Image (tube, grey):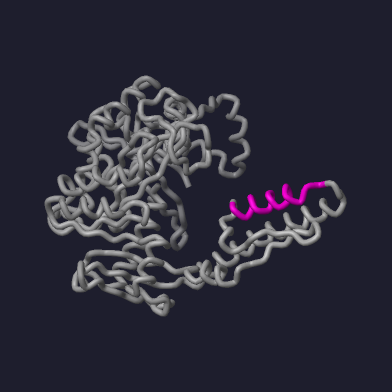
Amino acid sequence: MRLDTIHKTVNGKTYTSHLLRQAYRDHGKVRHRTIANLTGCLEEELAAIRLALQHKGDLTQLASLRENLVLKQGLSVGAVFTLDAVAKRLGLHHALGNSQEGKRALWQVLARVIDRGSRLSAVRLAASHAACDVLGLDVFDEDALYANLDWLHEHQETIENRLFRRLHPNGKAKLFLYDVTSSYLEGTDNELAAFGYNRDGKHGKLQIVIGLLCDEEGWPLSVEVFAGNTVDTSTFASQVRKVGARFGGGTVTLVGDRGMIKGPQIDLLEATEGEFHYITAITKPQIESLLKIGQLQMQLFDEELAEVTDVEDGVRYVLRRNPQRAAEVAAGRQDKVRVIEKLVSQQNAYLAKHPRASVAVAMGRVRKKIEQLRLSTCFSVSSVERTLTWPRDEAAWQERSKLDGCYCLKTDLKGEEATKELVHNRYGSSAESVGQNG
């Protein structure tokens, strides 16, 4: 095999061809066949092929050429290129636009996927990844990325509207899922930072409250940040206005958990212009109240879905018992019992070893623990000859456990608008989808 260079003159003009050819015998005659036409290759590439053919018997001889080679590490392309392709498919390019600010915002998203970190880390990441080349970015620094956050805030509604239109080309969505979370702050210089109900268990830390609105498939549509002391239900009004003004267009149903959609929020939906509906869950005390007045019956709580309709206001209740959840709750209650049992045993051992120890103090410790575990309706504490006892009220114990695994959904959707199965599935998707995105 060899590389032939052929010069041919036609009408006074010379043409040069580079052919990779091989000789072979055909009935005793030497013939040549062309394996590849390499005319379009660069001179450097042709030289490399000739060199490889020259040393094809022993390619290790090429190792001696390493002394003349200079190796350089280029920018990493794969991660940025792949994520940029995904961003295009998701519509982020269109939503953010082609301006430098839009491209910086896109890089902030991609940088967090490649390696979570600060604005400064995103600048450093761009120095090792081909962010500017792939995205068409000008050189930027940390201050430019912080200024880009202000740009995002100013254009948030436009960006969210573009993403919504991509997900819903007809401009309508019938179901919206909404939930609230919080995030604590290490610093104090934040205009929305405040002390509030801390889901992170970080007591003594300022926080912000974040509301996330999704469509029925769980795709995020809008996020809004509130002061850290904002009650969850207080965030609901702004979401209703947002849905009606920007994402509405027909019948709309908002899905939220039992802490989100209560009486005042339901009244707000009824008073808002447009046709709004809701799906939520009611609390255990509310279930007990409905059981007392006979509107619900315990036998309806089964593994199969049951439905009860209030004939006066048309509100529907969809109820069920989850046996797996019931077993988990019962097991958790037994764990609490074991904690009390261990404490009583420790106190009795101490009282026996120390004759002057106060029985009242020991009883107080056990009573405090029972109250902390919220079992004071089921257990009391007494003593017999310096030995503590904690008898259980069986009737209260049975009453406490009767609703284990039971839950009840509430909606004003009519049966012809949504079956009980659909209501159940939609509420389940709310907890699942919004929980994952939050």
Left/right placement of residue 405 relative to residue 337 reads left
Q: Position of residue 50 (x, y in %)?
A: 48, 37
Please identify the dominant SS of the magenta region.
helix
Q: Position of residue 205 (x, y in %)?
A: 49, 32
Please determine whether, in this image, residue 282 is positioned above or below residue 83. below
Q: Residue at coordinates 56% horizontally, 61% vertically from top-left?
A: 377
Find residue 388 and report its image quarter: bottom right
Please determine whether, in this image, residue 287 is positioned above or below residue 195. below
Q: Residue at coordinates 30% horizontally, 30% vertically from top-left?
A: 136
Residue 124 colored magenta?
A: no
Residue 362 colored magenta?
A: yes
Residue lying farthest to the front in this orientation: 385
Please determine whether, in this image, residue 192 is positioned above or below residue 317. above
Q: Nearer the viewer, residue 206 or 225?
A: 206
Q: Residue at coordinates 45% horizontally, 51% vertically from top-left?
A: 23
Q: Residue at coordinates 27% horizontally, 64% vertically from top-left?
A: 411
Q: Nearer the viewer, residue 202 or 334?
A: 334
Q: Position of residue 206 (x, y in %)?
A: 45, 31
Instruction: Specify whether residue 174 is in view.
Output: no
Q: Nearer the viewer, residue 434 or 355?
A: 355
Q: Position of residue 319 (x, y in %)?
A: 37, 71
Left/right placement of residue 360 relative to residue 131 reads right
Image mark count: 0
Please determine whether, in this image, residue 89 is positioned above or below residue 116. below
Find residue 208 and report its image quarter: top left
Q: Nearer the viewer, residue 435 or 48?
A: 435
Instruction: Specify whether residue 248 is in view.
Output: yes
The residues colored magenta run: 357-371
